[in-house]
Amino acid sequence: MKRLLGIVPLATLVATALAAAPTPPRATHAPPPQRLRVVDPSALRADAAGAHAVESFGTIPNILETFEPPATRSVTGRASSVAPTLVTPGTAAATDAVTPPIDVRFDAVTDGWTPPDPVMAVGRDHVVVLINTRIAIYDKNGTLVDGPYSLSSFFGIPSRFFEFDPLAIYDPHSDRFIVTALADDSSANDSRIYIAFSTTGDATGTWNTYDIDADRDQPGHWADYSSIGIDRNAVYLTANMFDRSDSFRNVTLFIYDKEDGYAGRPLDNTHLIDVRTAGNGAPFRLRPAFVGEIVPGDAFFLVQSSSNIGTTLNVFRLTGPRFSAPVLDAYGLSLPLYYGAGSGRQPSGSGVASLGGSVWNGWYRAGKLWTAHAVSSGGDNVARIHRLDVGGTPVIEQTYELRDPGADVFFPYVLPDTEDFDFALLSAYSSPSVNATGRYWNIAADGTVRGFEDLRDAPLANNSGRHGDYFAIGEDPTDPNRIWMISQYMKRSSTSGGDQVVASVRFEDVPPPGSPPPVPDGSQTGSQPVRVAKATGDEVTVTWDASTCPASDNHLVWYDLAQMASYVVAAETCGIGAGGTWTGLPPGGSVGVIVAGYDPPTDTEGSHGTDSGGTERPSQATTCAAAKATGGTCVP
């Protein structure tokens, strides 16, 4: 973040928000001026050591500690009848026999900035780390395998620009990486978004890099404090937009076709300018969600809460065609009055500003949207984690409070478990006896803290007054039970810069998967025999590896993606032969397809696979009159 603290506090924006219905954001759809650059990291030289820029904010007034909420105030989701769970570390026995400790821990690239703003994305083989001036790529053991490179050399940013606020995300739908940075030339009133898409799942390979006018259709503005999210359709960026006198103006949502980026085509896009809440307020620090699965109705979600004093959690549902006429519905969910967290205490030096009250990420899983923020309660900074049911009108289904008496928990990032309501939390953590560092929390569905561990000892106080604006948490695409995190801490002689630690832990003590799933890029045979491509008109061509499924005949089973867990069959196409290809019209709706081996007259059918618990999926296939045989070897 570049120049945030000189603006009107969000408390003022909330207090003056209108009660009228929200004004639809102004959408722009014309392709922006884009410059595509193909980056081959092997052609870049690692940065030479040089002078380090320091991000300075001056005196930061802390108005939050002036207002202490009543000690009797409780936490609850007012739209839900479920009572909240108040969580205190160590108050109950662990539900797992063993809570796995952090087993991977390494220091990442640093640059001397204040703050460094560390982010990361984890793929099948690599950990991509960005800070305010550099990018570096590591293997999962922490070995540097590429870089570090300056952001200016990686993205091709001209020297007249000041680059800041990098972001990174891994796309599990396509096995690709996306990284971004903001850049601004204030002398020329030129604000840009630089965005790079890896062309394969190998982060050390080539990248397609674009620079885009961030102030398109709103000249004289510049973009600050971006956030990133993803689903199967697009990559989503949000930014706070300021005028050139540094007055906040609006929040803009940028939507880009990620498949264009992977292929090096001009980016199909939509910009929704001046996003408004249900109360017609501006959702400062609006967070797009991470959506790694198919959502009923193909919806996408964003979330926001005010940073100082607030009573509302703002949720946005985006539906419709992403690049022509998306629909953005806003909902306001009532919260008790809360006060954003104040400075994190340390044993020496000044306190560390927490930017409390803002939500720090959103994560969608199985009909629930998870988010977290820090608030001031009883003299401590505590994290509140909200689980929202977003299957219909969003409601707060459960609120947890993570409290460590006498200590401060802030910058909370939540990641839900894959199979139940357990979750992990990455936060900043400090106390009168602990300098500010990152901490991992392992929390059961009943609120029990099963384990917690500092990502790294912090021998030095952070005397910069800031502990950054970004951390990151994510799951490993080859093992969803493995969690990856990055945060800042202090180890060097300077107490005004920052060092980055990457840490990884297996969330539960369960066996890891035997082998990684196939890479979903459509190029494999044998390991991933079924592929679908567009044919003529509305037809598609389905191909499969006939040698892997050597049935004398096959049929297609089309299933409803919105009800994939229960394997609801939408239609069947019988008698497609054994040649390895079929072209025709798919059924309507959002569907997937498998090729099932079928050998008349024995009426045996290939396996439909197993569910997430390892149980054989029941077959609802009936029209092809096949009897299911689960012991066969044809498993497309």
Image (spheres, helix red, strand yellow):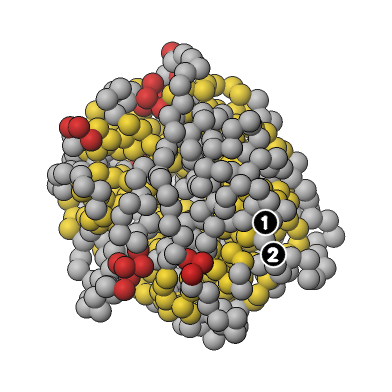
Residue in the picture at 42% in, 37% down: 55
The residue under label 2 is which amino acid type?
Answer: Gly
Q: Is residue 271 left or right of residue 595?
A: left
The quadrant holding residue 191 is top left
| First along the sequence among labels 1 and 2 | 2
Task: Give the SS element for disc 2.
Answer: loop
Residue sitting nearer the eye, 462 or 499: 462
- Quarter of the image with the N terminus in it: top left
**Badge 2: few (under 14), some or many (20 or more) residues near its Cα, within 10 Å?**
some
Q: What mark, if any, has residue 431 been given in the picture?
A: 1
Residue in the picture at 48% in, 38% down: 114
Residue designated by label 2:
406
The residue under label 1 is which amino acid type?
Answer: Ser
The quadrant holding residue 318 is bottom left
The quadrant holding residue 286 is bottom left
- Quarter of the image with the C terminus in it: top right
Task: Give the SS element for disc 1.
Answer: strand
In the rendered image, residue 536, in percent from the top left (x then y), is placed at: 26, 41
Residue sitting nearer the eye, 499 or 287: 499
Q: What mark, if any, has residue 233 been given in the picture?
A: none
In the rendered image, residue 530, in percent from the top left (x then y), is placed at: 50, 41
Q: Is residue 192 left or right of residue 465?
A: left
Residue sitting nearer the eye, 239 or 145: 239
Q: Is residue 237 above or below residue 518?
A: below
